[in-house]
Image (cartoon, helix red, strand yellow):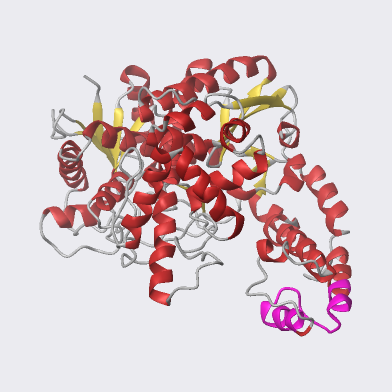
Amino acid sequence: MESVVAVVADPVGSGGRWCALAADGGAAGPVQAVPDLAAAVARREAAERPRWVWAATDEIYPWLLERAAVRPGRCHDVKLVESLLLGMAGWHARPRSLGAAWARLHDLPEPADAPEPGADDQPVLFAADRHHLPPDTDPLAALIAVYADQRRRIAGSGHPDRTLLLCAAESAGALAAVEMGRDGLPWSAAVHDELLTGLLGARPAGGARPAVLGDLTRRIQQALGRPVNPDSPAQVLPAFARLGVPLRTTRSHELREVEHPAAALLLRYKELSRIHAAHGWAWREAWVRGGRFRPEYVVGGVVSGRWATRGGGALQIPRLLRGAVVADPGHRLVVADAGQLEPRVLAALSGDPGLARAASGGDLYAALALDAFAGDRPRAKIALLAAMYGQTSGEAGQLLAVMRRRFPTALALVEAAARTGEAGGVVRSRLGRTSPTPSAGRFLDADGAEPGAAEDPGDSSSPNLRAARSWGRFTRNFVIQASASDWALAMLAALRRRLAVIGPQPRLVLFQHDEVVVHVPADLAPAVEAAVTEAGEEARRLVFGATPVPFPLETHAVECYADAK
């Protein structure tokens, strides 16, 4: 039986209290006070490696790392687990703090969650009202009571083993997120400056546009025949319309369909402007310290289980700037990428034998092309993406009909999920992460858009029907994307555990959906690559069971991140 210890910090000073817990979550011994909590946690971690139960990893763990450099192997994050369990009950919008969970146990009004800290805020461990417990409530007693209740709810879920795995993986992800923010991604300011100068020209003074953006602005205005601000759709769209080019938006996917020369110029402007705003000189001054990019990850920041960040853009480092990510001397970056993850997830979830056969080789799209599309890989890719994202217009609709005939089980799964969403119902990931309903409030996807907001250009039905179909497209993909998150978090937890066995030097420094980067001494790179492979296989087995579908992680040990692609 694993050792489980609930722990809280004192509101002032460096001490705290802890209590060993029984299998049902209740206290298994006396409460003990420790004068130096960080040191005591470090000693107990070394002695018995318990699963630590605390209110929120992102509040207590940065302080423990700072004080004692202790890296716990396992934890149970009450706030994150509460969020998962609330979602499974259809309560996505309810508060998830320790205080809110305790209030629900006692039929009291639920306090709103505290605002998330801003990008410039320092970690505040001992804020007295952080958990919104009533003034006379013992935080440790409340923590134990809420944990015991969560254990009961996990046991009573439809698939308790899967729910427990999801909660453990989410909590492990919280540990990794804090560590990655502390360790940071190696970042060369000199290379970054060289890349920016090559792309944008010399750094301008006073917040002006860089020279290259200024030149593109003039060329766009010349092509459109009038002065416009390329950052203003309200000016750009009418300018295109006067030239007989109707556009609904200035989004890149629409501009790529336009043959007018102004469209190509605007696309280039948007790409470079985004780099300047999101990863330019000012960004480096704000986020790169001591040769490290130190983002603040938000575990479960997207409803599908994907992570977000509190600024910094760690999940969207432009390919043009990846040359600035350079390993320390004598070190390597082991970059591991789970290629074609979501199509493989669909194959494993559905159990479709034809799609599973296509996934068994190296290139799923190429195998799919040989099976159903006369060897045409681009058309096979369009067809599979249409199946996963619900695109029905144009060529995608025709190819979707082929998919439906050749891979009926896979198509039945996503189409059932779409119908559920259109009817206002919920769908679940492999481990039980649950989609919100359209009325449950606004939830942002990885790009900052509301799930289901994208429209099919070929859908000319009524607004209400379009809205239902839009949400159906969201739930269609949710079952795949959220299950991919299940696998990715299980893989991250398994890899983190294996890296600790290798030694203190390998450090996870980046995680973005289907990719991880480990900074490691060069002589340990082969061991890390083997650990990555083992972690991916463990995650496949834990999440999907006996599926024949492989989830290969392609690894590269490189000195520069750009060389891995």
**Residue 557 in sight:** yes
Residue found at x 48% / y 38%:
406
Residue 312 horizontal side relative to residue 220, left or right: left
Residue 155 lies within the magenta run: no
Where's residue 276, x and y in %? 74, 60
Does 385 sit left or right of 139 as displayed?
Answer: right
Residue 126 locus on image (x, y percent)? 35, 51
Residue at horizontal 46%, vertical 22%? 537
Residue 42, image x, y percentages: 38, 26
- Range drawn in magenta: 219-241
Answer with left or right where residue 191 lies relative to residue 446.
right
Magenta stretch: dominant SS? helix
Residue farthest to the left, as pictured: 106
Please tell me whether residue 399 is drawn above or below residue 393 in the rendered image.
above
Viewer-closest of 330 and 129:
330
What is the quadrant of the C terminus in the image? Answer: top right
Q: Nearer the viewer, residue 6 or 536?
A: 536
Closest to the observer, 134 or 80: 80
- The answer to which image quadrant residue 361 occupies is top right
Q: Quadrant of residue 20?
A: top left
Taking the magenta stretch, the answer to whether it contains residue 229 is: yes
